[in-house]
Image: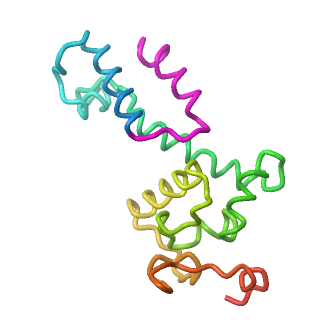
């Protein structure tokens, strides 16, 4: 309870709208479990502790999964309030790739997305891609732009002029 209420709440609040490197997440996990076990070796596998009470766990929060969820929570906000001031920065970056609505319909690979796209948005789109893969999500139609399977010179393509004139 102390970990969740005092430790994680402050960390997650600070990390909700920033990029958190994977090694930082590993360090935080290590310190949380070190606190839980009073700086001794883990007595139970960590995966077991994340489980519900009825499965023998203590419902320990997995900070990595929680950060993914917080990044994914930005998507409905960005889609719902499309013309708000809060969306001006994401729109500026994502517009170069067709916008968030369009990107969510694409079969993109984050590795190939614009190198000028901030890491926060790359992570957010990577987590969406993870969900699509996990649930075998397919829209049923193939979008040519930003498609990991349709490459020119080894990279997916996006032609702004065609997109604006709806020539795709």
Residue appearing at x 58%, y 27% in the figure: 13
Q: Nearer the viewer, residue 17 or 153?
A: 153
Q: Is residue 135 above or below residue 59?
A: below
Q: Which residue is painted at 72% across and 86% down in the image? A: 162
* Quadrant the N terminus occupies: top left
Q: Is residue 21 magenta?
A: yes
Q: Is residue 128 left or right of residue 60?
A: right
The spot of residue 40 in percent (x, y) is 19, 13
Range of residues picked out in magenta: 1-22
Q: Is residue 21 left or right of residue 26?
A: right
User: Depth check: 11 or 22 in front?
Assistant: 22
Q: Quadrant of the C terminus?
A: bottom right
**Residue 136 spot, x, y in % from top left:** 40, 67
**On the image, which quarter does residue 73 sit in?**
top right
**Image position of 76 with respect to 42: above or below:** below
Kindly identify the residue that appears in the image at 56 percent across and 48 percent down.
72
Q: Residue 20 lies in magenta, yes or no? A: yes
Magenta-drawn stretch, dominant element (helix, strand or loop): helix
């Amino acid at each position: 309870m102390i970990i969740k209420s005092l430790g994680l709440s402050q960390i997650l609040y600070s990390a909700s709208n920033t990029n958190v490197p994977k090694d930082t997440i590993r360090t935080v996990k290590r310190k949380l479990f070190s606190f839980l076990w009073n700086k001794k070796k883990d007595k139970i596998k960590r995966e077991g502790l994340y489980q519900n009470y009825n499965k023998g766990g203590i419902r320990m929060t997995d900070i990595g999964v929680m950060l993914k969820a917080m990044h994914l929570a930005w998507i409905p906000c960005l889609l719902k309030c499309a013309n708000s001031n809060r969306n001006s920065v994401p729109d500026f970056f994502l517009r170069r790739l067709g916008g968030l609505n369009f990107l969510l319909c694409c079969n993109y690979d984050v590795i190939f997305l614009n190198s000028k796209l901030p890491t926060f948005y790359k992570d957010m789109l990577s987590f969406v891609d993870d969900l699509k893969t996990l649930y075998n999500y397919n829209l049923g139609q193939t979008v040519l732009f930003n498609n990991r399977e349709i490459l020119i010179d080894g990279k997916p393509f996006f032609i702004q002029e065609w997109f604006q004139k709806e020539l795709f």
